[in-house]
């Protein structure tokens, strides 16, 4: 099919582009599977259609809260054979492997304040006691100012995440900031699963990239037969196939950066 909707149809499409069944493509089935896996992984991590923004909620239980207050010890040998012990707090939760990035964790503190002694409660009580005489714009501006002040007083909770480890570290005080049955909400990106969204297999860039990866493997397999002459004076030239595939891959990856990849956010300061 010119519009593959399954993994095998994508493989068949790529092999036909390389000349099958007219030509014998000297690539093992496992090598083809590796090439498809590499192509899909690259697509999921770089292509703007390879991942989607999603929200995950996580519920704490008391056992998890207690575990996050414990430490893992590591020992390192210093100069002079002196051993030093370091401790790392187990303040992380393990995310599913398809999560590729975490944008932020929503505020741990609720904006629905009912505490009489909270500064935000007092501000609203004194300045916004009569909404009939208060404009919505003024109310919104006061609310934003309140959050800015509260941020300065308490600070933003820090989080750390690396998709290769699938661990989201929460730099918070688990004795005061979390309790049993509390929820946190994560703003994150998850990889598109082709088995669930089979339109991925028909993506034009992915089809070309998969074909080029298989072509590179084909050329690499034939390199060792350089100079071998087959019946009919046919000479194998795996090096040419290999280098041609490398040029195609380089162009496709440049196209990814210029046309399909979301630019990284600028860092100031």
Image (cartoon, rainbow, N blue to C red):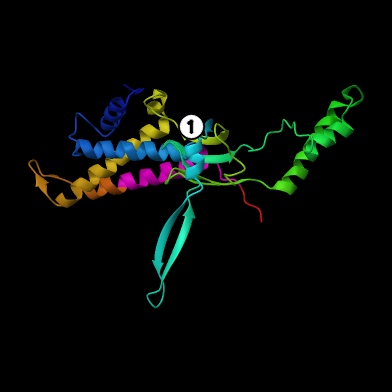
184 over 234 or under it: above or below: above
The mark total stands at 1
**Magenta segment boundaries in residue numbering:** 244-265
- Of residue 125 and residue 180, the one placed in the foreground of this image is 180
Q: Quadrant of the N terminus?
A: top left
Q: Quadrant of residue 149?
A: top right
Q: Is residue 27 left or right of residue 135?
A: left
In the image, taking residue 179 as reference, residue 117 lies left or right, namely right
In the figure, residue 80 lies in which quadrant?
A: bottom left
Tell me the residue that label 1 is attached to. 49
Q: Is residue 128 visible?
A: yes
Relative vertical location of residue 48 with respect to residue 131 in this rendering, above or below: below
Tell which residue pokes out farthest to the left in this image: 231
Q: Is residue 237 visible?
A: no
Q: Residue 48 appears at what percent x and percent y?
A: 50, 35
Most distant residue in the bottom direction: 80
Q: Position of residue 59 (x, y in %)?
A: 52, 32
**Location of residue 238 with respect to 25 vertically, above or below:** below
- Residue sitting at x 37%, y 75%: 81
Residue drawn at 85 percent across, 32 percent down: 125
Instruction: Please tell me whether residue 174 belongs to the stretch shown in magenta.
Output: no
Query: Split into 4 quadrants, where in the image is the C terminus?
Result: bottom right
**Along the line of sight, which residue is nearer the eye, 220 or 44?**
44
């Amino acid at each position: 099919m010119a519009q593959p909707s399954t993994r095998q149809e994508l493989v068949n499409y790529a092999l036909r582009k390389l000349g099958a069944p007219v030509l014998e493509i000297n690539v093992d089935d496992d090598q083809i599977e590796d090439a498809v896996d590499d192509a899909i992984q690259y697509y999921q991590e770089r292509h703007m259609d390879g991942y989607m923004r999603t929200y995950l909620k996580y519920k704490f239980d008391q056992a998890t809260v207690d575990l996050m207050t414990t430490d893992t010890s590591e020992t390192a040998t210093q100069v002079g054979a002196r051993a030093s012990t370091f401790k790392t707090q187990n303040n992380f939760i393990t995310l599913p492997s398809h999560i590729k990035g975490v944008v932020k964790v929503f505020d741990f503190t609720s904006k629905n304040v009912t505490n009489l002694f909270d500064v935000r409660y007092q501000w609203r009580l004194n300045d916004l006691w009569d909404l009939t005489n208060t404009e919505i714009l003024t109310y919104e501006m006061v609310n934003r100012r309140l959050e800015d002040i509260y941020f300065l007083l308490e600070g933003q909770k820090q989080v750390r995440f690396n998709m290769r480890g699938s661990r989201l570290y929460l730099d918070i005080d688990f004795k005061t900031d979390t309790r049993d049955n509390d929820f946190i909400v994560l703003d994150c990106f998850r990889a598109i699963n082709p088995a669930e969204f089979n339109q991925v297999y028909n993506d034009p860039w992915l089809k070309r990239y998969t074909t080029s990866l298989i072509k590179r493997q084909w050329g690499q397999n034939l390199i060792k037969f350089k100079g071998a002459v087959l019946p009919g004076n046919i000479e194998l030239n795996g090096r040419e196939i290999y280098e041609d595939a490398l040029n195609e891959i380089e162009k496709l990856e440049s196209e990814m950066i210029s046309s399909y990849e979301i630019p990284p956010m600028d860092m100031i300061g």
